[in-house]
Amino acid sequence: MIKTLLKNPLFIVGFSIILILFVGSLILTQTLHGDIPQKTLLYDKHGQLIDHAPLSPLHYPPFGTDSQGYSLFYRLMIGAKFTIGITLLVAGLRLIFSLLFGLIYGMYFTRWSGFLPKIIDAFSYVPMTLLAYILLSPVIMENGVTNQFEYSFAQRMGFEIAILTVIAIPTASLFFGNETKHILKQEFMAGVKIMGATRLHILRKHVLPHLTPKIWIHFAQQMIQVLVILIHLGLLKLFFGGTSVAFGFDETEYTSVSGEWSGLIGSSFNELTTTPWVPFAPLIMFTITLISMQLILKALQSAAEKTGQAPRRRKANVHINKETPVIRPSDFTFLG
Amino acid sequence: MCIVIGLLLIGSSPSLFNGIHLDIAGYLSALADLTKNLASPWHLTYNDLGTTRPLFPAIISPWLHSLLTLFLSFIIACFIALVFTYLTLLLPGRFIKAVRFILFILEAIPDVVILAVMQIGDIYIYQKTHLLLFDVAAYNNQPIFLPVFVLSLLPVIMLYRMMLIDFIEESEKPYVELAKGKGMSQRTVLLGHIFRNALVRIFSETKYIFWFMLSNLLVIEYVFNIFGLTNFMLRYSSNVTFTVGLLLFFVPIFIILSVCQLVITKVTKERVDIV
């Protein structure tokens, strides 16, 4: 499967974009030491002041600056490691736990198949963003009156990762459980059982190989879902790692603690009409990441189709006597 | 019925966490409270900045507005996707492949980007021509056109792509060849046979599309400052409003899906599981 993937240009493009963003972010964090290039005033070549921060992308390519004059490009690149890292981590955790529960459910709890799927089906009528928001807002939002977070940065981050993981697990577990059941119902399983295979053997040799392509596709889909939830939460002013709230004279200001992309969207979405490039820069980055993920997903799907449902197996070491029987004239006799 | 139990379990989930700690006992007691309260729906209340108000007449108007936006967008999305699919299928094969790929990429664009582009575009047009296409923000009169438009864009792309896949798959079946061999026109085959059969599979994705639209609805109501049901749930968030809101979304969607399932089973005599 990996070989077919590496030959697929869609996969290479998608994967390298995400890799460049992630590695570039790490390198920039190391080299800049937190000093983001800043330019508040812009002069023309005669020394005349022509513009001040926020500078538009025309004056300060590629993304312009925010209202404090910090380069949006560097801010976004430094934030990239958080966004991509969180997405990978949450999608990975979702995958591990749901695979575990799904396999247990599919292999052992065959009798629960009546009502459990229906209860879990309730999740398909619940907007995930709303559920995440309601569960997270008491912890992530800073108390505006006392200006203090109730929990430390690490605690808040852990809680957010846990919640984002947990809300998807029931549906995903059910998906893997049903897939497992589907494989166990295949015709060849009867033969496998007659040969005396234990459950562990069936799991290792038959269920997992069939599931592998689906696991990867599911992983890519989960990453897309996590990214979308992060955008939505950012818009609802719930930033990863904490929203610091400052009541101003006429409006409340929300700032992201970690500098992750969704925070930049939420804190600047109100300026959409005055300085559109400030909210648009993170949105463009999100779109690039999402499109790369979609390319990877497409490549995974076509690779899974190519390798087919049955994974390759080593040839059995059995010699069958393949001698074709020789037909001689003496084998036949004339009847009358 | 099981789904309602599931919704109750989800609805009381905010009590599952006390700060960042798990609170199972609190969860169970909240669940019991919730069930007891829901037994007498007319006595339910919500908390509006310290004053307690009865929930029921108050939640109806935002609910109807949300449902109107949701279903109108869905119907429009289905219709537009259908028209596009029909037009695309009349194109030569090379173009269809290109269209499929473009749609696949477009599907990745987050709804917030579409929202932002629409808002900016609207204001830009207003600045240039003094022609206000849609009201961007609203206080008393609730805008309906722009939210419906934005909400239906992504489902159009999704449905369009699904329909193309299903229609192409269906048109490779032998009966289509037979029908063409009998001298029926492309249009008759497409509308009379392929369409009817492919529709079954498209409707099996309806539930997923509604689920996807619910999250989008939340974002749209938030950005356009529409006082719909999701905004209501967000503003007066408590176990009761959350659960009642979820139930109010669930019931109409469930009824519509059930009706669709019944109709499809009757028409095509195929068993489908939509609900």
Image (cartoon, rainbow, N blue to C red):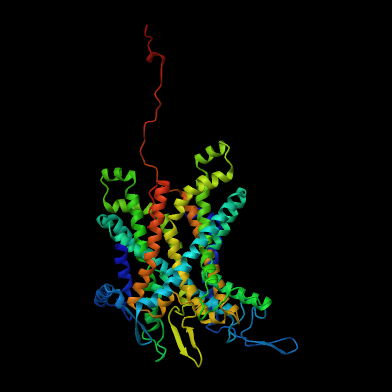
Front-most of B12 and B230?
A: B230
Residue reaching furthest to the top: A336
Name the side, left or right, on which A283 lies relative to B68. right
Name the side, left or right, on which A191 lies relative to A60. left
x, y percent for residue B74: 48, 62
Front-most of A206 and A31?
A: A206
x, y percent for residue A103: 32, 58
Front-most of B40 and A230?
A: B40
Residue B125, image quadrant = bottom right
Residue A12, image quadrant = bottom right
Instruction: Name the residue at 57% across, 72% down.
Output: A284
Front-most of B57 and A332?
A: B57
Residue B3, visible in the rendered structure? yes
Name the side, left or right, on which A58 lies relative to A221. right
Q: How many marks?
A: 0
Identify whether A220 is placed above or below A147: above
x, y percent for residue B45: 33, 80
Instruction: Name the residue at 39% across, 13% down.
Output: A330
Instruction: Name the residue at 34% across, 54% down.
Output: A180
Identify whether B165 is placed above or below B222: above
Q: Quadrant of the C terminus of chain A?
A: top left
Identify whether A239 is placed above or below B83: below
x, y percent for residue A265: 52, 78
Residue A93, visible in the rendered structure? no
Instruction: Name the residue at 50% across, 42% down.
Output: B173
Identify whether B177 is placed above or below A296: above
